Image (cartoon, rainbow, N blue to C red):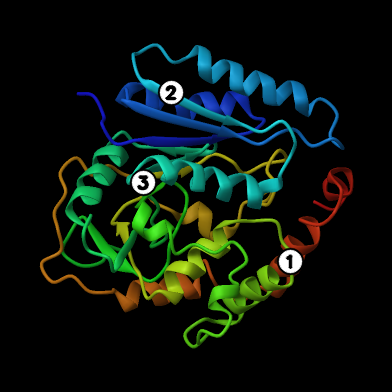
Amino acid sequence: MRLHTPILLLIFNRPEQTLQVFEQIRLQQPAQLFIAADGPRLNKPGEAEQCEETKKVVLQAIDWECDVRTLFRVNNMGCGKAVSSAIDWFFEQVEEGIILEDDCLPDPTFFSFCTGLLDKYRDDKKVMHISGTNYQMGNIRGDGSYYFSHYAHIWGWASWRRAWQQYDYTLRKYKEHSKEGLNTRLRNDLQAVYDRKIDTWDIQWFMTVWFNKGWVIIPNTNLIRNIGYGKQATHTKHIPAWFKKLTYGSIPVIKHPAFPSINEEADQFSVDTVFRSDYFFYVKKIVTSMLPHKIVELIS
C-alpha cells in the first residue's frame, strides 16, 4: 500500500548508509519525497565526490512514480543550519511529515506508526513530536504501544508544521523561560547553543519542545537503528554504553494508552542514563565540533 505521508530524507556524504535507509523508504513508495543535502566541506579532500555520489545513488534508486523535490546545497552550511533550514523548507510545503537522516534505519512499521499518530494528534497542539526512538532499554512504559515524554528524540521522527513553527535556531525567544527541570547536562547543552559553541540543530528542537511544555510520543520499542556511529560521523564517533543496551522491535498495530499523561518515571530513566551529566563527554563534543576535521580525527 502506498504511503501518503510526505517524507524528508536528509543526506550528505555516505552513499552506502544512505542507500540502506533509502531502501526502507522505497518499500513504502511515498507519494511525496523531499531530499535535502548539505554541500561538501572544503577542508576535507574527496568529500565533494562523496556528496555527489550520495545524491546520484538516491536519485537513481527512485523507481516508482512520486513527487520528488530536492534541496541540494552547493556550499557547506554545517550540520546546524543545513538540517534546520531543510526542515523549514519541508514544512513550508507540507502540513505534516516524517523526517529521516541518512544514518537512521527504520523498521517498516515506523512509517505506519508515524502516519497513524500524525492523524490522531493532528489537532492536539500539546503533542509536538512523534519519535521512532526509545531509550528505555527494554522497560515497557504504560499500557499502550507508546507513552508520552517531555524529551524529543530525533533518530527518525515526525511532526506538524504547527509545532515546527515554534522552532528557534538561536533559542533567543526562550532565553527568559525557566530552566527548572533541566539537569546540568541539558543546561550545558542549552548554554552551548547560546554561546554558539556547537554546530547542531537538535538541541534547539529538544529545547523548543521543552519550553513549550510539549508532549512527545515515544514508542515502547525502538523502531529506528542508528547506523551512524564511526569515523565518518560528525558527533558520534564512539559508541556510548547505553547505546549497546537498546532493544528493537516492531509495532504493526497501535494500541493507544488508556490514560494519556507524561510518564515521569520513563523521563527520569532517560535523565539517569542518556542525559546524565558527563562533563568529559560534553567538553569533547563542544571542542571537536569547533576543530578542523583532521585535528578531530587525531583526538578521537
Q: Is mark 1 on a helix, strand or loop?
A: loop
Depth check, mark 3 against mark 2: the one in front is: 2
Q: Examine the rendered structure and indicate whether residue 79 appears above or below residue 184.
A: above
Q: Examine the rendered structure and indicate whether residue 119 appears above or below residue 38.
A: below
Kind of residue at disc 2: Val
Which residue is painted at 34% across and 37% down in the image? 107
Choose the circle earlier in sequence order: 3 or 2: 2
Identify the image quadrant of residue 151.
Answer: bottom left
Residue 203 percent location from the top left of the image: 57, 63
C-beta proximity under 8 Å, tags 3 and 2: no
Identify the residue under disc 3: 248
Which residue is painted at 45% across and 31% down in the image? 34
Identify the image quadrant of residue 50.
Answer: top right
Residue 238 in view in this figure: yes
Identify the residue under disc 1: 196
Residue 236 numbered mark, or none? none
Q: Please count the marks in the image.
A: 3
Q: Which of 295 and 39 is in front in this view?
A: 39
Kind of residue at disc 1: Arg
* 2 displayed left or right of 157: left
Residue 57 percent location from the top left of the image: 57, 16
